[in-house]
Amino acid sequence: MTEVKIAAIVEGHGECEAVPLLIRRIASIIDPGFVPTVLPPMRVPASRLRKQGEMERFVTLASRKLQGRGGILVLIDCDWQDGCPAHDGPALLERAKQARSDYPISVVLAKKEYEAWFLAAAVSLRGKRGLPANIDAPSDPEDIRDAKRWLAEKMPRGTSYSETADQAAFTAIFDMEVARRADSFDKCFRDISKMLRELKEDANAWTCPDQASLKPGDMQADGEPTH
């Protein structure tokens, strides 16, 4: 199968490590042997991407990094005043597609912040990285303003939640199916799954062309296509 590549645009240092893990975990659900190549993410503040012309510019840069086929994922926190993933997400996606409509593109806005997804699946993190063995998820994880602080307050005295150390570690182990009760993660999961399936099918098509459509001169002596 031809290599499947994803170029990601994220906000924080923690997401630079966590998002590739998240993509690969979802890929393994589609096919345990499916390991997409996630290029080193570009780190861009949401406040910048929301400015006119900036989303378009960075999506174009991401497409150049792919050097051909691949998908583009934009994943940012929707934590600005009056921010709403259901309203702001489609508008940002439209701008991204205007820049490169020839690539599969997904724009995911985590409601409030990425860590809200850990809160939604808090039970699956019991006893992990200093969290108590009896931790329960809050009733409305995406309504908590500071999910990082919520996690930090559950950790032992003298320790704290570290975005650069803990975000990727929790991403590797949190129960994604449980986390899908958070609407923004459910969309994230569905978007990434859809993109990966499309790219995988496209890669398979390029690896195994329909030989019935090839002309005799397109075949080598060993029966392999000449292109």
Image (cartoon, helix red, strand yellow):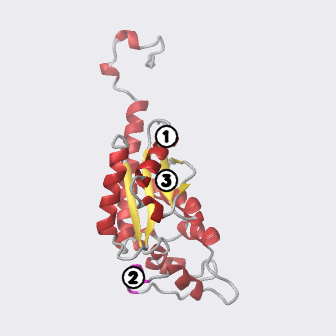
| Residue hosting label 3 | 8
Cα gap from disc 3 to disc 2, whole angstroms: 26 Å
Q: Nearer the viewer, residue 157 or 32?
A: 157
- For badge 2, the amino acid type reads Asp
User: Disc 2 or 1, which lies upstream in sequence?
Assistant: 1
- Name the secondary structure under disc 2: helix
Q: Is residue 114 magenta?
A: no
For the image, the number of numbered tags is 3
* Percent of width and height locating residue 217: 39, 9
Which span is picked out in magenta?
Answer: 139-144
| Residue hosting label 2 | 143
User: Disc 3 or 1, which lies upstream in sequence?
Assistant: 3
| Residue hosting label 1 | 64
- Name the secondary structure under disc 3: strand
Q: Is any part of residue 132 visible from this angle?
A: no
- For badge 1, the amino acid type reads Arg
* Percent of width and height locating residue 100: 37, 43
- For badge 3, the amino acid type reads Ala
Q: Nearer the viewer, residue 63 or 219?
A: 63
